[in-house]
Amino acid sequence: MVQPLRCLILSYFTKIDGMACAQHIDDRIPYLVEAGIEPVMLSGVCGGDWRGMTHVKAFSLAPSGIRFELRHLRKLGGMVRLVAVLLNLLILPLYLLEKLLIDLDSQWSWFPVATLKGYRICNRHQPKVIYSTGGPASTHLAAALIASRYRIPWVAEFQDPLVHDDWLRSKRALKVYTWLERFICSRADAVIFLTDRARKNANSRTNLGERGHVIYPGADPGTMPQIDYERGSCFRIAHFGSLGGSRNLKVFLEALQQLLAERPEMAAFIRLDLYGSCDPLSRQAINAFPLPDIIHDYGRVPRSESLVAMKRCDLLLLVQNTEKFSSETIPSKTYEYLHTGRPILGLVYHNPELEQMLMSLGHTAVAADSTPAVKQAIFALCSNWNKVGQSCQSQSSPFTVESAANHLLTVVAASGEILSGDKT
């Protein structure tokens, strides 16, 4: 009988409901187990517990990390909530001092305790490979220290670029993350990115070379409800997910308003359904729309309900941030959309990779900052829907969690002499 390959997985956010960073790894675990991987999970304290596997949690040391973790833990209610509120008040002065001196992400101080617990895991369970996925940069730093001490092959996965052009933190923080990116890319046996543009940009800043890989995360088609689409009396455009910052409906609403001004008869059957949270600026733009009856804001709904709504709508709306950072990222919601069988209108910002992904599967992609292009796309898609018996024929998506997990296993196997454990 072949022994399972024991793998130490570092993921700060695992088992946190509704968080893309958590869903990214959580969805892969069953496929990794089925393929013969025995996971040993090392995570932060915010999420739930994994059953059926060894799961160790580590806490952050700095005030910013403690405050972040307390915000999640107080959801447990009761005395935990009361203690969390009191601790938050007590550490507030230290938190303000930290932000003044150390302008890093809230989880930066997770790595010391995580590293020590990782040492203990290695002594007890002797994993043959380490896989860090984040999320916080401290996840990879802890993995690097553990891998170095025990000479274990290490695969690091960046879910978002550590360094990018739209830098909002201090110059000191930029230097820290630039150094950390070089450190990770020089020490890891393999580094995984979620887009090829992110890989190329990181390669230009580091000595990554041939150790860089691209794995599109995908989504699980099995989670989609078995509901057949039925054409209704209204053309329902639906957006799912949070709106905030430069990812907003400003351009889309401007395009829709111009279209309805030119063709007022279309207002009788066009509807925009919103599922998810909005920041104040997005809310202001929605409230200012001159035809409020067209927009239906459902707010946050359970995941099961949102999947049903996806399958029943006539057009799915995908909106990217209008920032340079967007050229290196693909919204995680994209992969879920692609398994609904519904047409997608993607407002894409300087991202040929995402544009090609959508268009190759029969969907529509236009410039996210071009009101005329968005207006033309809405009209074309609505006209297509209005023709009785005619609908968008999108292809089935090859981007699945299973394919991503299989690709990950290939990268893990190629990262060193893992099965024999004799990497030198």
Image: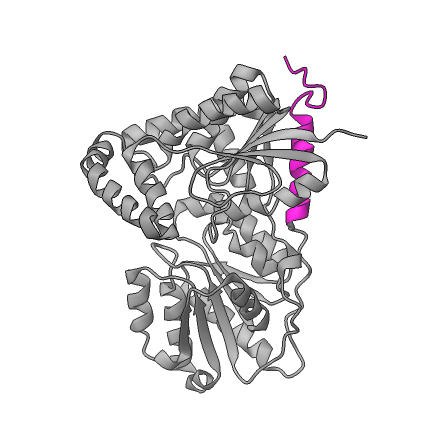
Residue 172 at least partly seen: yes
Taking 153 as reference, is 215 above or below it?
A: below
Q: Is residue 117 left or right of residue 393?
A: left
- Please identify the residue farthest to the left as the structure is shown: 93
| Rendered-image quadrant of the N terminus | top right
Counting from the top left corner in percent of width and height, residue 132 is at 53, 32
- Please identify the residue farthest to the right as the structure is shown: 1
Counting from the top left corner in percent of width and height, residue 128 is at 64, 24
| Rendered-image quadrant of the C terminus | top right
> In the figure, residue 309 lies in which quadrant?
bottom right
Q: Which residues are magenta?
A: 401-424
Residue 206 at least partly seen: no
Residue at horizontal 66%, vertical 34%? 38
Comparing 327 with 140, the one in front is 140
> In the figure, residue 223 lies in which quadrant?
bottom right
Taking 406 as reference, is 370 above or below it?
A: below
The colour style of the image is one colour
Q: Is residue 290 left or right of residue 125?
A: left
Comparing 23 with 163, the one in front is 23
Taking 287 as reference, is 330 above or below it?
A: above
Residue 416 falls inside the magenta stretch: yes
Residue 301 falls inside the magenta stretch: no
Comparing 136 with 359, the one in front is 136
Q: Is residue 76 left or right of residue 20?
A: left
Counting from the top left corner in percent of width and height, residue 93 is at 18, 36
Q: Is residue 8 left or right of residue 60?
A: right
Residue at horizontal 34%, vertical 52%? 78
> In the figure, residue 125 lies in which quadrant?
top right
Counting from the top left corner in percent of width and height, residue 148 is at 52, 17
Q: How many marks?
A: 0
Residue at horizontal 32%, vertical 59%? 279
Taking 388 as reference, is 161 above or below it?
A: above
